Image: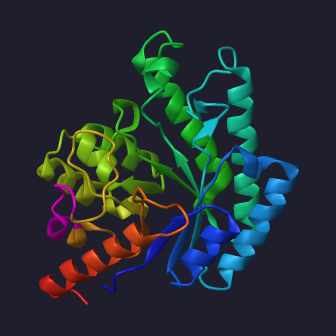
Amino acid sequence: MSILLGLKGSTDPVQLADRLRYRPDVYEFFLNEQDFTATGLQRLRAAIAQVQQVTPRIVLHQPMRYQGQFTELITREQAYPDLYRFIWRSTYHLLNIAATMGVQVLIHGAYARQTAQQIATYPDFATAQATLFQRLDTLKRIGGKRVMFENSMHPLFSYSVPAFNQQLLQHHYRLAFDTSHCFIGANGDQQTLQQALMQLAPQVVHYHLVDSFGKTHDSLPLGHGKINWSSVLPRLNPRASYIYEINLVDQNRCREQIASYRYLQSVALQMGIH
């Protein structure tokens, strides 16, 4: 199992140049609402073509916010019409680009900060979660092998509960697994994280490798938190891609991502994994 160099950045030319000089195995575009104007979409396609000169393994991360609101998939049109329309318009654009350019799309099952606000527009939690599954099923049907769904720290779409994970397996979703989100959702419990990694591995196609102390969304470089990476590494699906989704001091320099890659290489070396 070779250790992949997976980097994350925007369509900004300075960020692209910084990331591509390392010739990553995987590149994930972190997108925003400006990428979905006519000019933005043109720029995105050009940036994808640029990255494809280095690697075919490209993931498009849906925009997290629209006009300050998180793009929660359970958003109700009656309650937040503009946000609802942007979520679906941007998602259809992404799926179209994925189909025509041969890349992947990542959609969050939920975020966390405003998830409760959106759940409050439903009669109860169960109804909100049932609606989420209906929408995930729709995206799975439309996106096929081009779409994946990422976990949240919020119970609406958390990988820290085995019974919920079994539902995901039964739906045959293609999954993106954020290690810190699961660890935080499990209140920093290593065993819960390891169990989730093993349970979901057959359907995980992409990972966000991120360290954490298990309390808040701290997005630490690998080796700077409490996650036991020697336990995580052998539980990853070896066919999946991954990036190091780390908070950067300077968005134009991916030093913390590179440091995390080198840390994971050292863990693999100590474990005799090549």
Q: Residue 14 or 158: which is nearer the viewer?
A: 14
Q: Residue furthest top?
A: 123
Name the quarter where the N terminus is drawn.
Answer: bottom left
The answer to whether residue 226 is magenta is yes
- Name the residue located 58 percent from the left edge and 80 percent from the top edge: 20
Q: Which residues are magenta?
A: 224-232
Question: For residue 211, which quarter of the picture?
Answer: bottom left
Residue 70 in the image: above or below residue 4: above
Q: Is residue 223 left or right of residue 84?
A: left
Q: Is residue 24 magenta?
A: no
Q: Is residue 161 visible?
A: no
Measuring from the top left, give residue 53's x and y in whole percent: 68, 85
Q: Residue at x 63, y 53 (%)?
A: 31
In this rendering, position of residue 270 left or right of residue 61:
left
Q: Position of residue 113 (x, y in %)?
A: 44, 30
Residue sitting at 30 percent across and 51 percent down?
A: 180
Q: Position of residue 18 (x, y in %)?
A: 57, 76
In this rendering, position of residue 153 left or right of residue 197 = right
